Image (cartoon, rainbow, N blue to C red):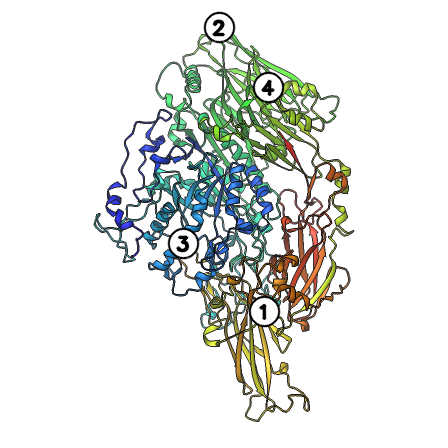
Amino acid sequence: RGEGGCGAARHGARMATVVGERVAKPVDAAGDSTELDADQLERSGEASAFDFRAYGHAVNFTRHSMVIDGAPRVLLSGEFHYWRVPDVARWRPLLLSLKAIGLNCIRLYFNWGYHSPREDAYLFDGNRDIDHLLTLCEELELFVIAAPGPYICAETQAGGFPSWLLAKRHIRIRHLRFHFVKKWDEEFNEHSLAWFAQIVPVIARHERIGSSRGCVVAFQVENELKELLGLDGELRCLAEGARRYGIRSPIFHNDDSPEGSWSSGALRRNPRSLWLTRVPDNSPDARRYRADMYGVDLYFLFPSMKDTADDLSAFVIIAFQFGGFAAFLQAFGIGGTGLGGRDLKLLASCFAEGPKHCPPQALAWDARDLVKIDRLEQLMSSFGGAAANAPVVYAETQVGWINQWGKRRGYDDLYNFFGGDQSATLLTSLSAQGAAVVSFYMAYGGTNYGTSGDAEVYTSYDYCAFVREFGMLSQRGRRLRVLANMMHSFHHERGGFAETSIVNAASAQRHALAQSSLSRMLIAVRRAVRKLPADRQAQLLAARSADYGDVDDDNEWFDRPYYIYLRYVPERTGIGEDDSLSICGGGRPFSLAVRGVVVPCQLHVRRSMIAPANVPLLNPRAIVHVCSLPVLLRTDHYHGAELWVVQVPNDDGALGRLVIRVRFGGGSSAVEVRARWALLTAEVLPDALSRAGEVSVKLDKEDEAGDDTGAPSLLSAPLEELPMSEFCAPQKPSVPVALKMSPATPANGGAAHRRDALLSVAFWRPCAVSLSDERGELLLRVVALAERDADSLVCHHGSEDVPYAARDSARVDGESVPFVAAFGASELAVDPAARELSVEWREEDTRAVVLCGKPSPKLDSMSASSLPEEVKAVFPGAFLLSPPSKGMWSGAVESTLDSNGRVALRDPRRYSINWVRDVVWKPIEYSSERDPLDHLFTHGHVAYRCRFNVPMRRRFWHWRSLSLTLNVRHVATVWVNGLGLGGQLSYSHNALAAGAMHFMDFSWAGRKTYDLSRSLVFPPLGAAGGGAEFAEQEVIVLVHTFGQNRQAFLLNDVRNRRGLLSASLHGSAVTDVRWDIAGVSTAHVSNPFNISGIPREELFRERVCHLADSGDAGTNAGAKVSEDVAHIKWAPAQPLRDTHTWMIDATLGLQWMRLKFASPRLSAETDAAGVRVRMPYRIKLHASEPNVSVFLYVNGTMIGRWISALGPQDDFYVPEGLLLKPDGTGDNTLALAVYTWRTSELSVELLPWIVDPVSGNLSSESSAIQFRLLAVKVPF
């Protein structure tokens, strides 16, 4: 077959006639236009096109959103890499944390190279058990977007391709012949389909289409291809293969940037040419491939653009560094050692041109960075095809950024660059562009444990994500949750966010929909596309008639909700960020006018909010006219009434209003609203404050205004004339809520025609309020939260609170799950399958409040200190939980820490590698067999041994010197006759340089010469061998490779050479040169990522008690591990000044160190109370010399790679699931492989995480906390 095979030719005629066809069918009664009817879409005509007629009842899509179980959904997804979480026990709590921040979907890459260590072997055990992973997603009610590649990028080894495939050098990986040039490779295609044959059936078993509990709702083929230079058959064959192996869900591909790749399917070209040409319609395989939906990656903030390049003469474009004087010299073979080729003195001066720590400016992004985001909807429509006839899948929406070896910044610096509000503000901006399928990359970054990362990244893959690497939920995740919970609360039966259309500025002005006193704050107004159920639509039209008379024109603007998008981002960094006018909590105040009603509002810099307007409530008399407070969530099912949760700026004032339009009752001449309020606390209050109370306001039809103080109405004031009193709370208010009511004057005038009153509710302090009318009927329940509680709020919409069509699938074992929300504790999560609330306390927490939509005896029994009766009478379903006692905190885990706050490291032992006894060498032909890829030594280290002879006696014609010139990738350490000689580094962030981390590696540059003359060894005269004519010399070169490149985009760099690129001996009549190689083949191990190629590593890859059965012995295959252990002679390793510092003697060569430590232990009181301790550890490394390399193993898993001067990581997370249970069964083993060519001190400390309580950044400030949680499970 040529390009475009896989049966595409058989369907060529059909493709030419079906693409663009509309299927005629009556409009669904639930919709009001063809854009809501999935049957009216212009769909793909590919043979692999989604069969919406057969499967649309379970999964489908309209132009606006995914439709699951018949209900349009907003999918807020997060990226999760299971292979970056080596301890399976953490999968469920991590997924639960992602669900707790409001994500209802997970995007999963499936890593081919991780599952297939050798050809025809596919492993799905341990943390490769994806069936278990998908089952967890189903239990936690998380949808899944499946992306099995075969290429996944993800900064992982070879972009997800297995080493054995790379070793087949005749195969064109991703069909790439050269950089940017593709040619069809049938063998590569067959191997890709063989991977699909293994992985796709597992995914297909979990499709929503096949089961009401299934999780997979969309399927992505390949990753980040360009249509311009791509091959249509590449995607077409993969899509058809996915269908053949069982996938029925919609298929998409993600464009690497918004360019419309694989969207239209209308452009035709000759597949045998790179030139875009028009060909006849009946030509098979001529049409561009078209996916069911259009996907795109969205990266737009690049710290490198705000940073300095390694070579100050280079320049940075987006994320790529080019040019520079050093790279210019390397093109001619000059230089190339060191970071970026600048450092001819090697690691000692990696950062000679600047300090080691040089982070980008914090919060260095502004409105200019969002310009393209604010034009996305128009751009997507212009692409046509899938982009215009299906929801756009924002497959990778930027959360943070990657960090590279040798950077002068860390992930904590990147977190400061983005800040805590960036993701929430981005989601607001995307929703303003109609986005309804947004997947964030990364939700949890994880750890590049072992050698799982590619050449660009080091051990940590924190990504400054929502959940930090060590498991702490950051402010970024908390702020995203505020918006996510709101978006999920407004589903399609409430005129939700899944299907909205933009309101152009002219229409918004003509109908007075929204206007801001600061125009830059208002970025968009959108209205719901789908009509509401008939009863609620009647509410809105009745209110519209009351406002404007009984005319029928323009009813469409008032028969459904609309949403006002507000954002405060400075025009330029440092300009327009002046909050000198800030009041009431530090935000920028402004006025918002909505259909004649003016309300105060405020935003902090770089924050955003969505103000809902024209929203009918469950009570038919009430409509939310506008809410200028951030809405956190809503539910119709809270003890017989609708519940809204809003946020007030702080504890001393509420800037913002909830304005409700209340209709006069039939025959009633007045409206009266009572607000019964309560404080959700059990704390002792000052005498001046009450715990509960009531206020009311009344308005007669004849009155002009009314409120509880008799003040005149300000609701209809001009936009710029709101006095300061409307923005600030009164001094020490005695009640937390204030009411004000004004008449809504109709267009046809006169009190006789007045039908509505406008109720304004202000919250002066956090509280819970029940609003009822003069007949005692509940209008609305409201909970107002301060910012800290708002940031901790989690919720689970019960089975009665999800869209009607999906309610059966939201039940657990046939039983309806109630609405549950909670706030107050540091980390909260709702587990719907277990019907449990996970509560994790910090020591500073004082209480948690649980709101349950139905009576809950279980919560009643769990409430350690119940709320007072007067509070329960006002607000039913509220429960108070108290944190563990101070005594429990003080005795929980302190026994594991010494007086300096460190975990004790005991029984230090040392073993030095003998390069003859401990290594199995394989002779090689230097000229053709030195590439590690040919031996599958692709992960971590590869060792070379060069043996040669020099004459015992030098003749006058012999050179006086003997030198060795080496060129390696990436780090080499050299020993000559057992003595450390030196080393070198060749690594660059430049895309065109020696050691380039991607793209073009100048393999001819990067050489360094070593003088061997003083290291030669000759047997003394008279000794055995002393009379020989020649003396044998031995050179050991240990090369640490950072990993294979990942073949990103259209780059052909996955086979860039590694290990020893070249070596040459000069002088002294060298003879009989022999080369050997040693390493660990990925084909000889079950887990190719958990290897580093260091000799004797097999002793530490598993716990010793399990090694005899592992068969995981690398190049020592066939040797019994138990026999190897027998001759290992561990020597005591005496520490220096304290118990955590050792001297690393360079003369001892490569060394192993072994230490013991205990897991965090529970006190008897804690254990008896059912409380669990969560206190993650970190290993902190420091060396006195810059050339020390350390590799860390905890209980058999390699958790860290460290080069002292290269950095930037010095603190390594110890995954909790790797530790032994603290039950007395044994201690944990910490093993270190250490080598250096210059004697150095090495400090190894095992510490808790001392972090900033907001960001999770490591901190030494006085406000820093020890990240330690006490966790309990609360059934509901």
State which quarter of the image contains the N terminus. Answer: bottom left
Please identify, in this view, whether the residue under mark 4 or under mark 2 is nearer the observer.
4
Identify residue type, mark 4. Answer: Ser
Determine contact: label 4, label 2, CB under 8 Å.
no
Circle 4 SS class = strand
Upstream in sequence: badge 4 or badge 1: 1
Disc 4/disc 2 C-alpha distance (Å) = 25 Å
Please identify, in this view, whether the residue under mark 3 or under mark 2 is nearer the observer.
3
In the rendered view, tell whether residue 1126 sits above or below residue 1210. below
Residue 1008 spot, x, y in % from top left: 54, 74
Circle 3 SS class = helix
Residue drawn at (31%, 33%), measured in percent from left and top?
Answer: 40
Disc 3/disc 2 C-alpha distance (Å) = 75 Å
Instruction: From the image, tell me which residue sits under label 2.
Output: 667
Q: Left or right: 750 with respect to 3?
A: right
Please identify, in this view, whether the residue under mark 3 or under mark 1 is nearer the observer.
3
Instruction: From the image, tell me which residue sits under label 1.
Output: 346
Instruction: From the image, tell me which residue sits under label 4.
Output: 770
Residue 349 spot, x, y in % from top left: 60, 66
Please identify, in this view, whether the residue under mark 4 or under mark 1 is nearer the observer.
4
Determine contact: label 3, label 2, CB under 8 Å.
no
Upstream in sequence: badge 3 or badge 2: 3
Upstream in sequence: badge 4 or badge 3: 3
Determine contact: label 3, label 1, CB under 8 Å.
no
Identify residue type, mark 3. Answer: Ala
